[in-house]
Amino acid sequence: ERRFELAEFQHAIDDLKATPFRRLTERFLRVNVSPGKADWFDDQTWAVVLQNYRVAAQIAKQGGCKGFMFDVEQYEGQTFDYRRQPHRETKPFAEYQAKVRQRGQEWMKAVGSQFPDLTVLLTFGYSIAQSGGAKDRSEVSYGLLADFLDGMLDVCPAQTKIVDAWEGAYRYKQEDQFRNAYETIKVKSAGWSAVPDTYRRHVQAGFGLWMDCNWRQVGWSVDDVTKNHFTPEAFENSVRLALKTSDQYVWIYTEQPRWWTREKLPQAYIEAVRAAQAK
């Protein structure tokens, strides 16, 4: 693991400070768990991990950001899958749970020491860690994520806000989909947490939408938008429903359209977002 120092990013902090933001008032620094190859029981490696997140918190704070977009998706490695852990033959699931919860506490202490009023947008929350048809969370690919989140909440500063930003809404078009997800975040997930009262104090519900959803399968057409998963009208409706249901945040993900250069971005989709906000 490479250890970062704040001085390496001073130019980025200076750029953020020098930018006259007007509309983009809610800015988040994206941080990932990927590549996710750190051994939960390796104190030396975790010292580096925590240092790097501490630096990230300083960048976000000094750069005027609201906090982190914390992407917990396992793009590489299986950070939260007990079945993939190197010591699973000698350390039972409960021992891993305790260690992961400890690391969650350490993580929150590290970032909170630099940015106590941090807002953390999570791509996934407690729901993805649940067993479903499996016997228990030891057989779920994200099973240990719940323990990490419990650790975060254990030592969460009073001013810190955690948002389950629900990437699972990427394809949503119906109001009941957003309402059911909201219920899961606000009620069911509190029951899945080991610290439900703390959860209720700190956790909000948000939603993510993937504008060019499934473009590899259905394509992304700028000429015939009826071929897209979301037409501009459908996307306006989904953004409106997400904003109506969310506690505060709705985020939009794209792969083909480019918002800065307008590449592969029909004007109708820009107007759809504006219309949804206006309504």
Image: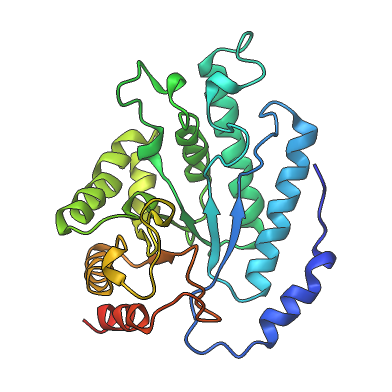
| Foreground residue among 105 and 67 | 67
x, y percentage for residue 74?
Answer: 55, 39
Residue 196 drawn above or below residue 229: above
Q: How is the image coloured?
A: rainbow
| Foreground residue among 236 and 23 | 236
The residue drawn where x is 35% and y is 49% is 168
The residue drawn where x is 22% and y is 74% is 233
Q: Residue furthest front?
A: 223
| Foreground residue among 103 and 239 | 239
x, y percentage for residue 163?
Answer: 41, 56
Q: Residue furthest top?
A: 90
x, y percentage for residue 235?
Answer: 28, 69
x, y percentage for residue 215?
Answer: 41, 57
| Foreground residue among 107 and 176 | 176
Residue 17 drawn above or below residue 173: below
The part of the image, by quadrant, that contains residue 111 is: bottom right
Q: Residue furthest left?
A: 176
> Is 194 left or right of 94, judged from the image as shown?
left
How many circles with numbers are drawn on the protein? 0
Residue 257 drawn above or below residue 33: below
In the rendered view of the protein, which quadrant contains the N terminus?
Answer: top right
> Is 275 left or right of 111, judged from the image as shown?
left
The residue drawn where x is 34% and y is 67% is 248
Is there any visible trace of residue 107 in the rendered image?
Answer: yes
In the rendered view of the protein, which quadrant contains the C terminus?
Answer: bottom left
The part of the image, by quadrant, that contains residue 47 is: top right
> Is 49 left or right of 187, judged from the image as shown?
right
Residue 62 drawn above or below residue 76: below
Is there any visible trace of residue 195 in the rendered image?
Answer: no
